Image (spheres, rainbow, N blue to C red):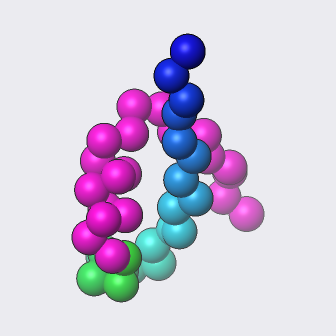
Amino acid sequence: MEKGSVYLIPSLLDEQGMDAIPLYIADAVKKCQVFFVENER
């Protein structure tokens, strides 16, 4: 069985927040097929 990966992705507080996330993280997010998220607080 192939092992998967888990990524902890920070939430963005504004539209320009993507500038603070490294490109390799943004690329990993685009490749994700399943997301587990928590509700807003």
How many numbered discs, if any?
Answer: 0
Taking depth in this image into account, of 6 and 12 the one nearest to the observer is: 6
Residue furthest to the top: 1
Q: Residue at x 58, y 59 (%)?
A: 8
Q: Which residues are magenta?
A: 22-41
Give how far across and how far down residue 13 sits, in percent: 47, 78
Q: Quick one: quadrant of the C terminus?
A: bottom right
Is 30 one of the magenta-colored residues?
yes
Q: Residue at x 57, y 46 (%)?
A: 6
- In this rendering, the answer to whether 6 lies above or below 1 is below
Q: Residue at x 36, y 76 (%)?
A: 21
- For this view, does 2 lie left or right of residue 26? right
Residue furthest to the right: 41
- In this rendering, the answer to whether 31 lies above or below 12 is above
Give how far across and how far down residue 36 sits, in percent: 60, 40
Give how far across and how far down residue 24 sits, in percent: 30, 65
Is 19 one of the magenta-colored residues?
no
Q: Quick one: quadrant of the N terminus?
A: top right
- In this rendering, the answer to whether 34 lies above or below 11 is above
Taking depth in this image into account, of 31 and 41 the one nearest to the observer is: 31
Give how far across and how far down residue 3 sits, in percent: 55, 29
